[in-house]
Amino acid sequence: MTAADVVVVGAGVVGLTTALALQRRGARVTVLTADDPADTVSAVAAAVWYPSHADEDPRVLRWARETYTELRRQCADGVPGVVDRPTRMWLRRPYAAPPWWADACGDLVAEPAGAPYTALLRFTVPAVEMTRYLPWLRQQLEAGGGRVVRRRLERLVEAYDTAPTVVNATGLAAGRLADDPAVHPARGHLLLVANPGLTVSVRDEDDPAGITYVHPRRHDVVLGGTYQPGVGHTRPDPQEAAAIRRRCVALVPQLADVPVLGERIGLRPARHGGPRVEVDPAGPSAGRLVHAYGHGGAGVTLSWGCAAEVADLALAP
């Protein structure tokens, strides 16, 4: 195997954006992945910029802001799958001030709303069709000389035969590979339905029956969803699917008669305490180990900002 400066373990959106960030700074990069990028949980994501289930944190806000800026630039440049999506977010809880993440997206406006809602937030954010975007990330990496290699590791130390610096972007597998008990799955269930002409994303995360969101794409609409911490299976649940559809139709009545095209179930790589992005102080003396995992349902939202910090850590003298 040809030597590389950095090996990134994991080919979800965090792994691939990190690999590109490293390559753009001059590193030779190899990505090792147990699964094809199209088979990672990133491919299941609704992938609308929004720091879902992320706690308020200056570091997370910085990653979100930098990612927002980069994705808006990519949209303007015509990157496949990236669009600017007008968004409406209905709130049921008392509204006193803009949410902590509002500063990252810039154009948020709040309006009064009638019961059962207290306010309506209007803003525009990037949305990403992952079935188009993940292949683009891979193509960019390979066009710059990087490689994606299918290889399942039993231990992270095995990656050091590829490069002296290892980035651990293994998502849920980091619980085992990094011996981190804070890592846990958060099951997500969504439906895909035909698009009757919708262009605006709508969400109601305060719905007592479950998080509810409607995200239109080119040829379909993503209806969600669930967020079930600690649930580690991907079995379909017809009653759950029916409940998701009922909530989404109540939110957007135009969806009442559209056909269901499919459903997707994935396990978000969540972590108690938030994402782990740091140099491992106990890493092997012969190399450097940088962790980049635990982004939960906000992988796309934090991807480019996080990748820049990981590249700083990986390439530091």
Image: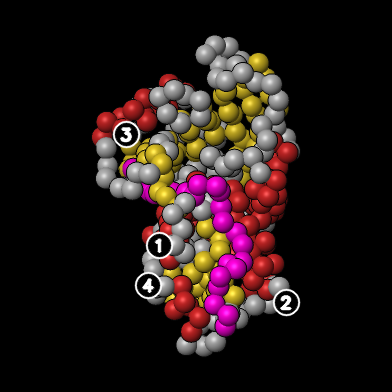
Residue 317 is marked as 2
Q: Residues within 10 Å of mark 1 (few under 14, many from 20)?
A: some
Three-letter amino acid code at the position of disc 1: Arg
- Residue to which mark 1 is pinned: 176
**Quadrant location of the C terminus?**
bottom right
Which one is earlier in the sequence, the residue at label 1 or at label 2?
Answer: 1
The extreme front residue here reads: 282
Spatial distance from mark 3 to mark 2, Cα to Cα? 51 Å
Spatial distance from mark 4 to mark 1, Cα to Cα? 9 Å
- Residue to which mark 4 is pinned: 154
Where in the figure is residue 170, as x and y percent of width and height?
A: 47, 63
Of the residues tagged 3 and 2, which is closer to the observer? 2
Where in the figure is residue 252, as x and y percent of width and height?
A: 47, 25
Name which residue lies at 56% across and 48% down.
Answer: 274
Name which residue lies at 59% across and 55% down.
Answer: 303
Which one is earlier in the sequence, the residue at label 3 or at label 4?
Answer: 4
Q: Secondary structure at mark 1?
A: helix
Of residues 57 and 120, the one drawn nearer to the viewer in this rendering? 57
